[in-house]
Amino acid sequence: MEKKPATEVFSNWALIGKDEGMERGHANSVKAMLELALPMVRDDFTAIDLGCGNGWVTRMLTELGATHSEGVDGAVEMINKAKSLDDAHKYSLGLLPDWKPGRRFDLVHTMEFLYYLEDPSAMISTIHDEWLEDGGIFIAGVDHYFENKESLTWPEHVGVHMTTKTISEWKDAMENAGFNDVEIHQVAAKDDFPGTLVMLGRASRQ
C-alpha cells in the first residue's frame, strides 16, 4: 500500500468530521498530560500546540490560564476548521519541521504528532533549541510506540509513514536534545491499551 502524506489524510478527516472523534479519543490523555505540565509553568504562561487539528487544545490552554495560545498544523483543512470554529486564536498552516513559530513559548504541547516525522528526534532538539524559553516545558504524547503492540499495524492500516520508537528511545531523544528533569509516563491506560506514552522535560540552554 502506497503511503500518503499524513497532512493529506488529516485534511480528508477534517472534511468528513473525523477531527471530532480525534478530539474525543484523545481528551483523557491530553487532560492527564496538562495536569502534569501546568504545575511546572509560570502562571502567565504562553503556549503552542503542534499538530493542533481543529484547535481544541489551543482553546483549552487559554481556558487553563495561558496568556497567549496558538496552534500549528500541516493539514490545510484542519487549519480551516480551526479558524472556522474560533477567531480568537492564531492558527498557522505549516509543514514541520521546516515551519518556524517566530517566537518562544513557556509551554510546547503536542499529542499524536511526532511519529509522523521521518526524524522526530531532530524535531525534539529543534523544539528545545528554538521554540522554548529557557526553563520552558515540553510535553508530548504518542500512542504509536513499540510497546503498544496494537499500534504497530497502524502505518499499514492508515497508509502513512510512522516512526516507531521504544519507550527508552523516546526518553533518549529527550535527554539527547538537552532537556532536564525528563519524565516518562503512560496515561489513560484502558483494557488492552497500555496508555499514551508521555514525554515531559524542561529546556535548559545553560
Image (cartoon, rainbow, N blue to C red):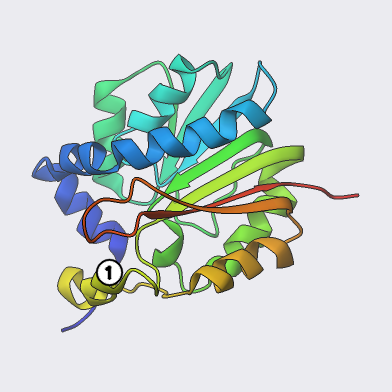
- Locate residue 38 relative to residue 143 in the image: left or right: right
Residue 102 position (above or below residue 170):
above
Q: How many numbered circles are shown?
A: 1
User: Horizontal and vertical percent for residue 30?
Assistant: 39, 38
Comparing 180 with 53, the one in front is: 180
Q: Nearer the viewer, residue 50 or 87?
A: 50
Q: In the figure, is residue 41 to the left or right of 11? A: right
Residue at the extreme right of the image, as rendered: 206
x and y percent of residue 49 in the render?
47, 38
Amino acid on which the number 1 mark rests in the picture:
Ser
Secondary structure, mark 1, is helix
Q: Is residue 60 left or right of residue 43?
A: left
From this viewpoint, is residue 102 visible?
A: yes
* Residue at 38%, 51% in the rendered image: 74
Q: Which residue bears the numbered disc 1?
A: 151
Q: Residue 40 placed where, x, y %? A: 67, 31
* Residue at the spot 34% in from the left edge and 32% down from the top edge: 55
In the image as oriented, which residue stretches furthest toward the front?
A: 191
The N terminus sits in image quarter: bottom left
Q: Taking the image as drawn, is residue 93 in sight?
A: no
Q: In the image, is residue 50 above or below residue 152? A: above
Q: Is residue 6 left or right of residue 98?
A: left
Q: Residues within 10 Å of mark 1 (few under 14, many from 20)?
A: some
Residue 109, x across and y down, in percent: 51, 41
The residue sitting at 43% across, 36% down in the picture is 32
User: Farthest residue toward the bottom?
Assistant: 1
